[in-house]
Amino acid sequence: MKFGVMFANTGPFVEPDAAVELAQAAEAAGCESIWTVEHVVVPAGYASQYPYAKDGRMPGGREDFDIPDPLIWLSYVAAATNKIRLGTGVMIMPQRNPLVTAKAVATLDRLSKGRMILGIGSGWLEEEFDALGVSFDDRGDRTDEYLEAMKQAWASDTASYRGKFVNFSNVYSRPQPASGHVPIIVGGHSRRAARRAGELGDGFFPGRGNFDELAALFEHARHCAEESGRDPEALEFTAGGPTSPDYVERLAEIGVTRMIVPPMDPSQFSKFGEEVISQFSSF
């Protein structure tokens, strides 16, 4: 079982020294990855329901909190670390131009020597889409098409793509990722997200669900991968939750190989590495 740190670009870690301290402490403790969140703007008084809290509000209930740009924040800590993977968890894909994003992600991957993980989602905050002038209703279709276009830009010598939302022909997108591809982890908790992971992603990270619900989503992702002619066993599954032995073992039984935990005081990471990461390294 690998361990990653989520919500890394929030709270005190929006500040430069604290960001570096967090990333270095997580790396030294044996954490495999560090993950950011994204909102370009948070509209005041939003009515959309945050799907991962019972009260429908983002953690803390505030709207006026700092959320640094995920790729810039990850670039900053990449320069201060050596091996920890750099994950967006998640980037709101339909709000971004796919070619601009492909360029930025590939650049960070090359500069970090292949450490980038692209975690993506289709978004939930309709008012944010409105502020950015992006349609909310077709965000799922946009997400699928943008991923296809980005993968084409990374994998091809000269790339071409024709779709409903994206069209380009015979273009060079350079630099390309260090290994030719950046792993794509699909976030979400719906069957459509599971299908997206199976058809277009390299892994799946449902943001919520009990063991039975997670197992069903993982199985659907595998099925969709197989239906698409892809290897279902190559999919990597990520989940959050408590780090008790029973919980971790049950996650491992349904196929989870990475657990994501909230950030902690950097001084606590050494203990976390000794008591948790080392204990579950064989799961």
Image (cartoon, rainbow, N blue to C red):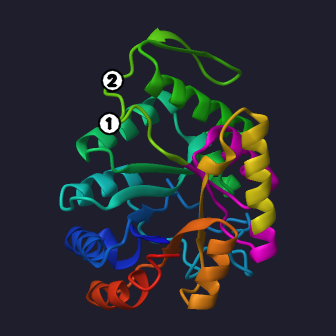
Q: Nearer the viewer, residue 65 or 24?
A: 24
Estimate the spatial distance between the alpha carbons at disc 2 and disc 1, rounded to whole Å. 11 Å
Q: Which residue is mark 2?
A: 174
Residue at (78, 57) in percent of width and height:
219
207 sits left or right of 114 in the view: right
Depth check: 31 or 209 in front?
31
Q: Is residue 191 magenta?
A: yes
Residue 138 in view: no
Residue 118: % across, % down? 48, 48
Q: Position of residue 126 (x, y in %)?
A: 70, 53
Toward which corner of the image does residue 13 lie, by quadrant? bottom left
Q: Position of residue 121 (x, y in %)?
A: 62, 51
**Quadrant of the rendered structure where residue 172 is?**
top left
Query: What residue is shown with label 1?
Result: 178
In the rendered image, residue 137 lying in the magenta stretch gets the answer no
Q: What amino acid is found at the position of numbered circle 2 in the picture?
A: Arg
Residue lying at 67% horizontally and 73% vertically, measured from the top left: 253
- Chain part drawn in magenta: 185-214
Above or below: residue 208 compared with residue 128? below
Disc 1 residue type?
Answer: Ala
Q: Nearer the viewer, residue 186 or 130?
A: 186
